[in-house]
Amino acid sequence: MGTNGNGRRGGTKIPDVRRPMEEGDCIDMESPELDFVYDDCDTQANEIAELYSYTEHPEFQYNVKAFEEIMEEFNFPPSWQRLSSTQQRTVVMKLLEHLDVAVSEIRMRATRCILYLAQGCWAEMQSDAEQAYWARVNIMTLYDMGTFAAFVELLNLEIVRSSAAVASRKLAESLADSTNLRVILSVLYLITEHMRTEKDNQELEYAHLVKTFKDEIGSPFGDEMLPVKLLGMVTQLCNGTTPHFPMKKVLLLLWKILLVYLGGSKQLKERKAKLREKYGLPPVTEDTLEIIKSMRSSSPPPSAADILENQNPGQRKLKENERALRRQTFIKQTSLDESDEQIFVDKEETGNGSEDYSMEFQSMSSDNNQNANTNPNCPYYMCIKRFDSPPPPPPLPRSLPWRSKVRQKDIDMFLDNVRIKFVGYSLPGDRKTKAGLPQPIHEGIEILKKHMYTSLAEVQAEREYEIGRSPLTRGEKDVEETEVEILYKAMLPNLPQYMIALLKILLAATPTSTAKTYSMNIMADVLPEEMPMTVLQSLKLGIDVNRHKEIIVKAVTAILLLLLKHFKLNHVYQFEFMSQHLVFANCMPLVLKFFNQNILSYIGAKNSIPIFDFPACVIGEQPELTKECLDIGDSSVPYSWRNVFSCINLLRILNKLTKWKNARIMMLVVFKSAPILKRTLKVRHALMQFYVLKLLKMQTKYLGRQWRKTNMKTISAIYSKVRHRLNDDWAFGNEVDARPWDFQDEECALRVSVDRFNQRRYGSGVDHEGELTPVDTDLNSVLDTIIDLDEEFKTNYELWLDQEVYNNEINWDVLLSA
């Protein structure tokens, strides 16, 4: 049986109130190491299964019925496999003609038949593999004959028709209100998902169709692109005008459309390499995800309160003796118990099994049995061996996992400081002069330059600065029309509304949210018309509701992260524009609210019933609903793939929003994120812990000396796992250096730069051909004033040009700065 976000058995009612965990709460039993592999998305089978809610199962039979009726009308046998390829294409052609019929019943029956074909004609199949084969073949045939474009038109029609119908009737609360939309979105999603996986198919059988599909979704359908249309549906739901929209299907389709159109992590890596080469920057040799794969996760650091709460004074005295004994052995302790030698440290500091361990130790001390020292089968053999003749510590790694970096800005600041210290004056803008500086400083400068890393963001920001200073001479001649550029231009007018809408839906689906914290209905495609009558049906619906929310969280986090990564690569100010509106919409406290729960229960939640997942729910003989059915699952996997994926996505989003932004880092401090993030380290997964440690590292210097003193294991983990910046004072920062007013100035300056970028490239400063045109917004400017020039000036105009313009040197830097 599945569990809800609290780790309790599923039910239809989700608790409204959850007590936020406090720093002193007891640490749960240590979680196992997760073998989770982070990727762009889950397997195709799982991604397709998540498209359907369990309450939609009866509708599968409607699809078969529609297929059989239509095949009878077309005078074909109701068996897709028995038809030739030509006959199959004839059927598809006739079905597409039915989509143009004005009668809604005829039109929707054809859409159900097409959905049945896209689902692999499962009623005729004997296995999942056979169904998957026919689904792939049918979908490629359907797309080749223009089904995708036809269904986008149907989507437009259904949005307008159903919106008017629902608005005039009532607020939608059940599956019945979104039936037609769910069928249309399901067909669009199945085509998109198969095109996504077909990109990586080595056979290249349908490579031409994949390319055509990508070009098609990059072109406007009617007056707008499909991703923008789907974002508009999200916004309409949040505005309350269309409460019947099946939001899970909309978000899943939007995510997969973006993944196909923009590309995943592989395409991002290739694009980054090309851009760095274009700007003359050295290639990046380190891949974060690949390096993390070679790291081991760490045991969570307990708080002092956890230790004291689980031991009485006598046990504390005994443990002090044990610590003294361990100090005498000089056993090397690596950060957060990296080796198996730290078993006792884990037990002692987490409070688990403390009584058993104390009894064992007392027994060893009082009963001086020589056999225990020599008998490997004795339960105390390893303990005594450890204290009597400690084994050599495991070899330390030869180096830290990351190459250190430093920015040009940091080198400039270092040069200014040492010049003032040793020479007494500074040379702004001079990066070469070392006169008067001691030899060790010369060596330090060389080391800094050796580790200097210039990011694409720095280059792009510098280019914008130069264009702002000299718009006529250094302006952009043309902007490369990449997929990201096209999408950004299409999203720009309503991008703030899109971000607010996505975060509202994320809030509604967050386990820690209560019914009072959100107003929109995200359950339109999961709640049945008639509520369950039996306990088992209630349990099944409870699991379905929790599963539904988890899938929505998964889709929203994937969409946000994908857009942030692509915008940042295309132009840093596109990324900053989206980031600012996420921050304005309270994305940061929302992410922290999400993690302020029992995170081990969340990632271990089994809110799925494998025998009810598609296609298992329709192939073969179906069992009756019993308690045993709900309990069947893969017990060997101690985590939910989608929930771990969502958690890592949220941590990555939070990292992207706060990196190098002092004002936002201070927000992390104000929101008391450190204890929440520290508890997240309980999850034994290297990649997830890595992003948590990065978030802790950036705020460590603002948390105070006492926090650093009592969290040295966390500090050690940061040191051993997170990249170092050579001039960074994160571990010993002075709280006096935290000046919030300066940080707000940085944020305001960034906003001005972003607005100037959008105005220059997409606003009134750019004409339809993309050429830069002068823009004068100063009310007191003379450019808009009509002045009559006398005849003498007109006659001597060329002489005036020679004397006052061509032969007169103008210091433009001084003029612009003035």
Image (cartoon, grey):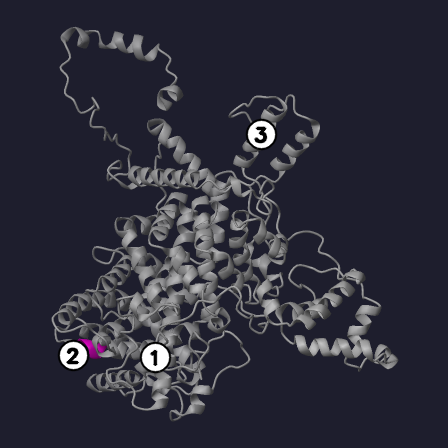
Q: Dot 2: what SS?
A: helix
Query: Quick check: 114 above or below 211?
Result: below
Query: Quick check: 132 above or below 284?
Result: below
Q: Quadrant of the C terminus?
A: top left
Residue at image position (28%, 35%) is 771
Residue at image position (32%, 55%) is 499
Q: Which residue lies under the disc numbered 3?
A: 417
Residue at image position (12%, 76%) is 103
- Tell me the number on the disc at residue 13: 1
**Amino acid type at mark 1:** Lys
Task: Compare residues 18 and 798 and report the one nearer the observer.
Answer: 18
Task: Give yes or no for contact between labels 1 and 2 (Cβ–Cβ under 8 Å).
Answer: no
- Tell me the number on the disc at residue 105: 2
Q: Quadrant of the N terminus?
A: bottom left
Tell whether position 173 is magenta: no
Task: Compare residues 680 and 616 and report the one nearer the observer.
Answer: 680
* Distance in Å between CA atoms under marks 3 and 1: 62 Å
- Main SS of the magenta part reads helix
Residues rendered magenta in the picture:
105-110
Residue 306 in the image: state x and y as whole percent: 58, 67
